[in-house]
């Protein structure tokens, strides 16, 4: 309403409107108080401003818009239970060190930084992660190895004062190609995602998407410049095996609600995404941008992880006589095509046909009711077990009725503002060749 108008359009809605809550959070941090923010409001609540309480005290942000017990009651209960029972440390401080020749350039996450490199954490829990940027301090490192060390001093919930020290030694190489070949694509996506979110906060949402794209393009250009002339002679987009998923992860992240126009996503929803990205693990950050699509009917064979092989995120992989489950790390969407046989809808939901049935009233049948229901429940439980940080609500979507969230997850397809995956690959290739 008026508060939103006062902050202006575009990225202004993602920036705090006042320093009051940040200053309050700093005072709380000094008193070892951690603040969690639970937003169940049906209208604009300005999470960008209020969320500073959690951001600077090591807390969590929960977003349950227009809360109604029949729809979100289980999520509220499960999330609150996990929040109170998860592993956590109190009155913590953390410092990250690097060996000579390297320096810590910046930190990203939920904390308050004291001095230059001491992170104040009134509460540190199992669901939080921190990103650290490391820069070169000198032209060359002193020897063949580089060391990084993170030390966390905290009090357990039983009252014991402990320190946990993690030290990592990495080899040093003069060959840039070795760095590309050993890159961790999930970690790259997690860090660039946080940097892009910060760019969206500082200016406008589209600037964040452009930052993601430019980072991907420059990485591809730099790698091609390192390849031998015989390899560069081929008219192909060159990628190391370690980063072969970088283009699709980048495009998927660019299509996040965080970077869409203000008319496509509420400001509070986008602010919540910023907080999710700020604390997500590397794997979770990748799935937040690039969901996983599983076929549940007809049942697909499961692998060692207990999950079927993910399908491409394109409408070409979706058929109207099938049912699919979309996992975006925050929610689960069960999409049911118009032509899905009655045997599945009866076993899964207890209805021979979903025609005329309100999707919000649909619930999965108990696992004991039929083999199909047991298999579907087991699949949902397996995915939820791998995401303990937040309860993943299951939304049942009917084709053509309430399936916009599912269609938005098909990130390989073209949208009004963004290219399709093949088009993006072609764009990357043309850019790299133009810089050769």
Image (cartoon, rainbow, N blue to C red):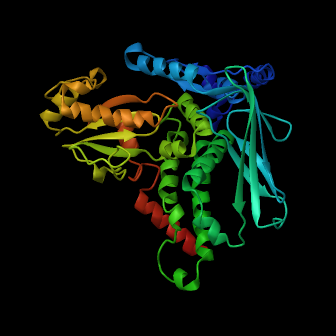
Residue 42: give x, y in percent of width and height: 49, 18
Residue 140: give x, y in percent of width and height: 82, 67
Residue 162: give x, y in percent of width and height: 74, 30
Toward the bottom, the furthest residue is 230
In the image, 364 versus 10, the foreground residue is 364
Query: So how many labels did they put on this image?
Result: 0
Residue 23: give x, y in percent of width and height: 79, 23
Instruction: Relative to 159, say whether 420 is above or below.
Output: below
Instruction: Relative to 327, say whether 40 is above or below.
Output: above
| Residue 291 in view, yes or no | yes
Residue 224 located left or right of residue 151: left
In the image, 210 versus 161, the foreground residue is 161
Q: Residue at x 30, y 47 (%)?
A: 302
State which quadrant residue 270 falls in. Answer: top right
Residue 74 located left or right of residue 122: left
Q: Residue at x 43, y 44 (%)?
A: 291
């Amino acid at each position: 309403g008026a508060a939103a108008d006062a902050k202006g359009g575009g990225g202004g809605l993602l920036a705090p409107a006042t320093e009051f809550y940040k200053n309050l959070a700093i005072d709380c941090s000094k008193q070892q108080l951690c603040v969690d923010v639970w937003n169940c409001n049906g209208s604009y609540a300005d999470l960008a401003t209020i969320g500073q309480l959690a951001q600077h005290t090591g807390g969590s942000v929960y977003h349950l818009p227009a809360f109604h017990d029949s729809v979100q009651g289980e999520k509220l209960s499960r999330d609150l239970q996990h929040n109170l029972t998860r592993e956590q440390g109190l009155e913590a401080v953390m410092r990250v060190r690097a060996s000579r020749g390297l320096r810590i350039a910046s930190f990203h996450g939920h904390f308050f930084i004291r001095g230059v490199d001491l992170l104040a954490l009134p509460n540190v829990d199992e669901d939080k992660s921190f990103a650290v940027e490391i820069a070169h301090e000198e032209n060359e490192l002193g020897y063949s190895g580089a060391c990084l060390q993170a030390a966390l001093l905290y009090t357990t919930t039983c009252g014991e004062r402990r320190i946990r020290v993690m030290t990592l030694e990495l080899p040093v190489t003069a060959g840039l190609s070795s760095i590309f070949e050993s890159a961790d694509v999930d970690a790259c996506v997690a860090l660039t995602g946080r940097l892009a979110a910060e760019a969206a906060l500082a200016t406008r949402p589209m600037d964040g998407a452009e930052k993601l794209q430019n980072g991907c393009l420059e990485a591809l250009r730099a790698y091609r410049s390192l390849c031998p002339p015989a390899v560069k002679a081929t008219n192909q987009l060159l990628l190391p095996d370690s980063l072969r998923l970088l283009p699709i992860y980048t495009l998927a992240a660019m299509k996040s609600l965080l970077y869409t126009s203000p008319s496509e996503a509420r400001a509070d929803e986008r602010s919540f995404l910023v907080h999710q990205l700020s604390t997500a693990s590397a794997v979770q950050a990748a799935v937040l941008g690039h969901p996983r699509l599983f076929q549940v009917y007809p049942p697909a064979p499961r692998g060692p992880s207990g999950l079927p092989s993910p399908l491409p995120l394109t409408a070409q992989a979706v058929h109207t006589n099938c049912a699919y489950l979309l996992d975006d790390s925050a929610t689960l969407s069960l999409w049911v095509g118009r032509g899905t046989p009655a045997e599945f809808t009866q076993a899964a939901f207890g209805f021979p046909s979903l025609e005329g049935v309100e999707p919000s009233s649909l619930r999965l049948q108990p696992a004991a009711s039929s083999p199909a229901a047991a298999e579907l429940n087991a699949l949902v439980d397996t995915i939820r077990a791998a995401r303990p940080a937040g309860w993943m609500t299951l939304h049942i979507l009917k084709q053509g009725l309430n399936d916009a969230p599912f269609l938005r997850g098909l990130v390989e397809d073209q949208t009004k503002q963004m290219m399709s995956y093949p088009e993006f690959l072609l764009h990357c290739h043309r850019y790299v060749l133009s810089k050769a």
